[in-house]
Image: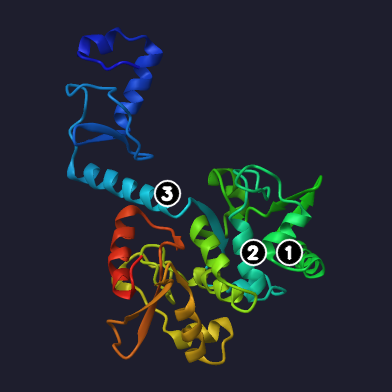
Amino acid sequence: MTALSTGKQFVQLNPATRRKAIAQKQNYVVKDGKPYSLETGEYLGDLFTHDLVPKMTETKFRAIESIQALGSHKEENGGFVFAFFQQSRTIIERFPSLNNADIARLMYLGTYIAWNTGRLQYDNGKVISHEGFEKLTGLSRKRARELFSRYCQEGIISESEGALYMNPTVFFRGNIKSIQSHTADLQHTRMFKKTVRDLYDLSNGRTVGQLALVYSVLPFLNFETNIVCHNPDETDSERLQPMNIESLAELLGYANAAKLKMTMNRVKIDGKVVFGFFENTNDRRQKGITVNPRVVFGGNGEQLQAIRTQFNQFGGV
């Protein structure tokens, strides 16, 4: 579509093109003289002249900055899949037959699901077979079959016509509205693919279970702050009740809180911590826990910037 130089030219457009132009006009803001989509943050091109472009309010300016910040974050960390969970209920309660290593491998497999179908496949579109499942999990054939059986028994993975599929109520990549009828009683957040893969690749057979800690804290994570809380659904940050390491250890079945903290401190990406410990302003003897948004994050761009600023104190993001 060519640039419109006058309002007269706009009126002379055919009805379909004019409706499209109006719809785009209503869903973008202008920054530095250029129009950007409010939905995606993408540059729309020279579709309108200044007489057609709406004035950008401070609210719209913040909105476009928020969208662009979140878009950059997604790109930097390899895109994302949605991770589903039941709020304030541990992952082990939901999937009692899985251990930490099983959960870590499940997170890794979750980064290989196809758009909207949930089929396990490589980034080039090639379907992941049982042999591929074995290679990705890094297990022997016998142990891979045992793990696959546990996933099937828990209703996590299924098989159809030689292809493997992820249950969309566990991990999903695509239009989330298409599965709303199945996820009404679940919460979800974004889990970033590249970061999870990098963390998995850095682990070995003995340490792979450490990655499960990320998934394990999701039911207690406040989306706006990435703080592990007793009341994760609270929207007023001043009313949050941060969870200390002792309480988290009890919930996750760790007998020794100091050992849990030591394990959490070992989980790093590019030499930077995944779990940050900060002083609880309500009780300075206690320390709260924040999760690095490079791994999981469910809020908007403005909230992301605030967390990144806080996380710089813990070694950066």
Identify residue type, mark 2: Leu
Select label 3 or label 1 by which is in front. 3
Please name the residue shown 32% across and 23% down the image.
22
Earlier residue among tags 1 and 2: 2
- Tell me where residue 214 appears, x and y as whole percent: 51, 70
Distance in Å between CA atoms under marks 2 and 3: 23 Å
- Tell me where residue 67 appears, x and y as whole percent: 33, 46
Is mark 1 in CB contact (under 8 Å) with mark 2?
yes
* Image position of 47 with respect to 284: above or below: above
Label ID, residue 247 = none
The picture quadrant where one finds residue 57 is top left
Please name the residue shown 42% across and 80% down the image.
243
Q: Residues within 10 Å of mark 1 (few under 14, many from 20)?
A: many
Label ID, residue 151 = 1
Camera sees residue 149 = yes
Label ID, residue 106 = 2
Residue most extreme to the top: 12
Earlier residue among tags 3 and 1: 3
